[in-house]
Amino acid sequence: DEVYKTVTYPLAKIIYAEGGNQNDEFQQNVGYVVLNRVESKYYPNSIEDVFFSSAYNEISRERYRNNEVSEKAIENAKLVVVDLYKINNTYFGSDPQIISDMEK
């Protein structure tokens, strides 16, 4: 599935790299931050480019490059990708198009 390859799996690798030993809430928050950065005009517009252009440490970058990931990180990435979490007209997570693509 295209959304899994281009959004969910790369996001899961970042979640694992940054918070692999943390609880679900922490891991999901890592995912929300990454997706918000992708949507921001101040960061690149791809998950991988956001990760490598941001101030993530070298250990996290190495985990990402080595494709280190856990089932827990994948499940948390899936939740972030399909979640439309809205606070004061600000969306955290993904947009409706991604949800539509995942349902296909």
Image: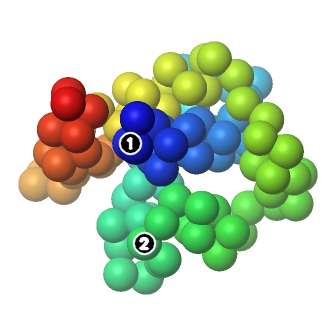
Please give the name of the residue rendered at 72% of the width and 30% of the height, measured from the top-left corner: 69
The picture places residue 86, in percent across and down from the top left corner, at 17, 43
Please give the name of the residue rendered at 43% of the width and 82% of the height, measured from the top-left corner: 42
Q: Which residue is mark 2?
A: 45
Please, what secondary structure does the residue beneath circle 2 have? loop
Please give the name of the residue rendered at 56% of the width and 26% of the height, measured from the top-left corner: 74
C-alpha span from label 1 to label 2? 15 Å
Counting labels gives 2
The picture places residue 66, in percent across and down from the top left corner, at 85, 45
Disc assigned to residue 3: 1
Is the residue 98 above or below the residue 20 in the image? below
Give left or right: position of 29 versus 23: left
Amino acid identity at mark 1: Val
| Marks 1 and 2, the one that precedes in the sequence | 1
Amino acid identity at mark 2: Asn
Residue 42 shows in the view? yes
Please give the name of the residue rendered at 71% of the width and 43% of the height, measured from the top-left corner: 18
